[in-house]
Structure formats: C-alpha cells, structure tokens
Amino acid sequence: MILLIVLGLVGWQVYNQINLDKHPILGAQKLEQYAQKDEQTKSLYSDAIKLENDLWADPANVEKHLSTMMKWKSLGDVTGTKEFYERSNFVLMHLLDQPNGNTSLVYQNIATNYKYVGDYKMSEQYYRKAIELAPGDPDIYLLLVELYKFRMNKPKADIMAVYEEALAKIAQNNVDVVIDYAAYLYGQKEYQKSYEYYKLLVEKFPTNKGYKDRKDELDSILKNQSS
C-alpha cells in the first residue's frame, strides 16, 4: 500500500511537470497563493492570468510578452515576492526564442528582475548582454553602475571602468552619464577628474548654479592641494 502511494505521488509529480511544460499557464496559476495580500494584488494577479492566457494563444506576439512580463513585475513590486519576478523572467526567456524577441530591452528587463530576486551575478550578465546589443544606450550603463554600487559593492576601479566605457562608446558629452560620473567622482574624492566633468557641465549649462558652485568648490580644493 505504501509503495503504491509513493508511486502514485511520483507519477503525479511527473504528470504535473509534463503539464507545466505543455501548458505554461499552470505555472502561473500556482502563484495565486502569493497574491492574497489585498484587493489590489488579487486584481493584478487576475489581470496577469488573463494576459498569460492571451499570450499562450499567440506565443510569437512580442507586445503580449512585454505586457505580461510587466504585470508580473508589478506584482513583484507591490508584494516584494520574488516568485513574481521569476515569472516575469519566465515570460521574457520565452520571448528571447521568438522572432524579433532578442533585443536589448528584453535583456535589460531580465537583468532588472534578477536584481530584485537577489541574483546579482545573473543580473550583471544580462546587463552586459543588453550593452552588447545597444552599446549606445546610456541607461543600461547607469543601471549596471547602480548594480555595482548598491548591490554588489564593487570596488571603485570597476565602477569607474563602466562610466569610462559608457563615455567612450556613447559620447563624451552625454549629459546623463557625465552628471552621474561627476557626482560619483566627487564622492570618491577624485577631485581632478570630477572637476573636469563639472567644467563640461558648466560649459553646457552656464546658468546652472549647482554645477557652477561645485566647479568653483573643486577649483578651490585643487588649488589648496597644489599649494
């Protein structure tokens, strides 16, 4: 009798896994237990299930993939439950195999989901893949910098290398990267390099008092250091 029960349980697990592989919506339905926080999460979960049903009826549709993954990510944001971010990545991984699905945006979203799950090495890898596909997009470099600074505690040299790579591949005067890098250098007491970038910002935004004040402060620091 015990043997029959064990065999029955094993058989059910195998059958269940086969059904999850054939009918991926079953995997989504298993997440309902995490969506009982309040009416908002219940509604978001219901929307996500509807979107997934539509997606698997039209599995090559890029927009349906993106809409579905965003709904699961929203559930992750609201509940802090990693399983929803993992589900979002499940959808995105499927999208990578579709025509026109292998894009920088998809890799970027996979990386962000991995970050929220706490798998920082995988997040780093997918941000790098996103950069390979879109080396001129400053936002991806800044996301990688954020990961290095606040999640992975990378050394200063590694962080600076990402900024320098961004400026080399995009443009020396890319405003978003320059602003972020100038502030980072200032915080790291890399005053000479910080001064150079604040000087660029003042040239680009001559009426910005904050940039001018910081440049003047750095000018004073550098003169004191040299005296």
Image (cartoon, rainbow, N blue to C red):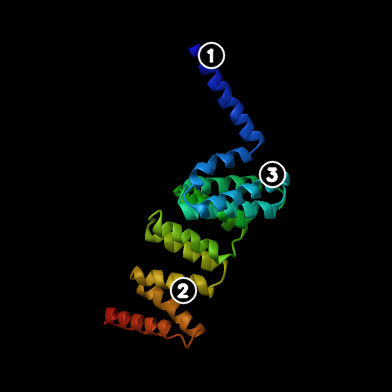
130 or 18, nearer to the observer = 18
Q: Nearer the viewer, residue 88 or 12?
A: 12
Position of 88 compared to 197: left or right? right
Say whether disc 2 or disc 3 marks the residue closer to the N-terminus: 3
Residue occupied by mark 1: 4
Residue furthest to the bottom in view is 207
Q: Give the number of callouts.
A: 3
- Rounded to the nearest angstrom, the CA distance separating label 3 from label 1 is 36 Å
Q: Nearer the viewer, residue 119 or 170?
A: 119
Q: Which mark is residue 56?
A: 3
Residue 179's disc number: 2
Q: Nearer the viewer, mark 3 or mark 1?
A: 1
Choose mark 1 or mark 2, whichever is in front.
Answer: 1
Q: Secondary structure at mark 1?
A: helix
**Amino acid type of the residue tagged 3 in the rendering:** Trp
Q: Residue at x 30, y 80 (%)?
A: 221
Q: Residue at x 52, y 17 (%)?
A: 5
Q: In the image, residue 148 lies at what x, y percent?
A: 43, 57
Q: Which residue type does callout 1 highlight?
A: Leu
Q: Position of residue 112 (x, y in %)?
A: 51, 54
Which one is nearer the viewer's eye here, 26 or 225? 26
Numbered disc in front, either 2 or 3: 3
Look at the image and tell me whether residue 124 can be seen. no
Amino acid carrying mark 2 in the image: Ile
Q: Residue at x 42, y 73 (%)?
A: 182
Q: CA distance from mark 1 to mark 2?
A: 67 Å
Q: Secondary structure at mark 2?
A: helix
Residue at coordinates 49% horizontally, 84% vertically from top-left?
203
